[in-house]
Image (spheres, grey):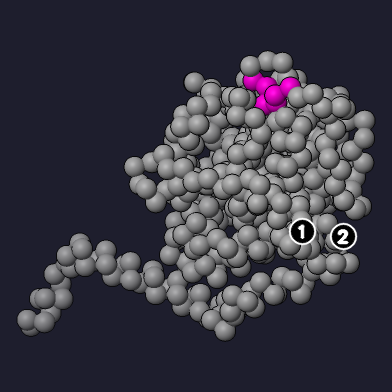
Amino acid sequence: MRIAVLARRPLPAAWVSMMSYRKSCSMFFFLFFFSDGLCLRDTRVDLINDLHETIQCKKMGELAKTLEYHSFRSTIPLKKIVVDDDHHKSWSLYDAGPRSVRCPLIFFPPASGTADVFFKQIFALSAVGYRVIAVDYPVYWNLREICEGFQKLLDHLQLDKVHIFGASLGGFIAQKFAEYTSRSPRVASLMLCNSFNDTSIFQQTSAAPTFWMMPALFLKKMVIGSFQKGMVDSSIADSIDFLVDKLDSLPQKVLASRLTLNCMSSYIEPQKLLPVDITIMDVFDHCALSQAVKDEMYKCYPNAKRAHLKSGGNFPYLSRSTEVNVFIKVHLQKYEGTKYSAKEDLELPGDVIPTENNKNTSEASDLTNDNLNEDLTGDQPNNNTLDS
């Protein structure tokens, strides 16, 4: 009788909460350990090698071993700046070009990348007078925090308005920052490369709050699923190989925070970005975003210019860097001679971007502001995978 009476008593709220938490954790680890393809027998090396073995190409990329990359790392220092009360949250950045420019071009990397994935743009553009800054975000778990942190970074660097080139997740964060500062604008223009305006396309909204406790192996496998597989040309293979190395270098906490930002329920309010000059850059071959997502971006920004590449994969700023650099110059050209210019006038003959060895690239000759708006057609994949 005593046992029956005790059984009818409600458990303390703290006990119920603890039991629910332990139950959810137990379910997660059961699924993680025993799901197909996610068992513990896979090691980190196996994970990275799996991707390399699936890419059949003429030559595996070795961008990290090139003279150009080593020259970049040896001449442009990586700076760390703390702008938050938490000293563990430091922004890492490469700052190249004339410091007299107060409206530079800032690069936001994708979820799988670091600031140095834009080394080809930093080298080529700073050589002709542009001030370019590539940043790595600290660990932030919501979009408001990262917008506040970036605003503090701009204040620390004494920058008023900036141009932002955002790739994938970086493009989404750039849009959110322009939205966040719409009443007191800090964004002069945006270039959105293979980006999106609604995180629901990845269908991971319900799982996003659990990313913080997932092992790095699980998170990396999620991202690698969006990388291109099969026959690709050497420059695209090089770009994938480079991003795999960068993904492998990300700590669990950093990757978890980025995927949380990438998948948490959020969307852009385009009416707040109406005054912002926008160029949408995308590719016509395989990438992580479907044609429907690209069309939604076009509808969201009907007045935006469009910079199309026939090929380039998920990372055209590496695989098609010459064309991307030309598009960037065309986008920024209208600001030259104004207070929002990202370039300092230099006495250079021709003002030509240094040539780069890119094979099988789409033609980038005769580019003007008019043909940035040209619509091209091509076969597109219909599935959306996690931002890479």
Task: Residue 281: give x, y in percent of width and height.
Answer: 75, 39
Front-most of residues 348 and 279: 348
Residue named by callout 1: 66
Residue occupying image coordinates x 90% and y 45%: 362
In the displayed structure, 299 sits above or below 29; it is above
Residue 305 placed where, x, y %? 77, 29
Q: Residues within 10 Å of mark 2 (few under 14, many from 20)?
A: many
Q: Hey, what amino acid is under mark 2?
A: Asp
Dot 2: element: loop
- Please state the total of marks drawn on the protein image: 2
Residue sitting at the far top: 338
Could you tell whether 179 is left or right of 28 in the image? Answer: right
Mark 2, residue position: 233
Q: Which of the image's four quarters has the C terminus?
A: bottom right
Q: Where the N terminus falls, by quadrant?
A: bottom left
Q: Nearer the viewer, residue 355 or 209?
A: 355
Range covered by the magenta-colored residues = 340-345
Give the spatial CA distance, label 1 vs label 2.
Answer: 18 Å
Q: Residue at x 80, y 52 (%)?
A: 319
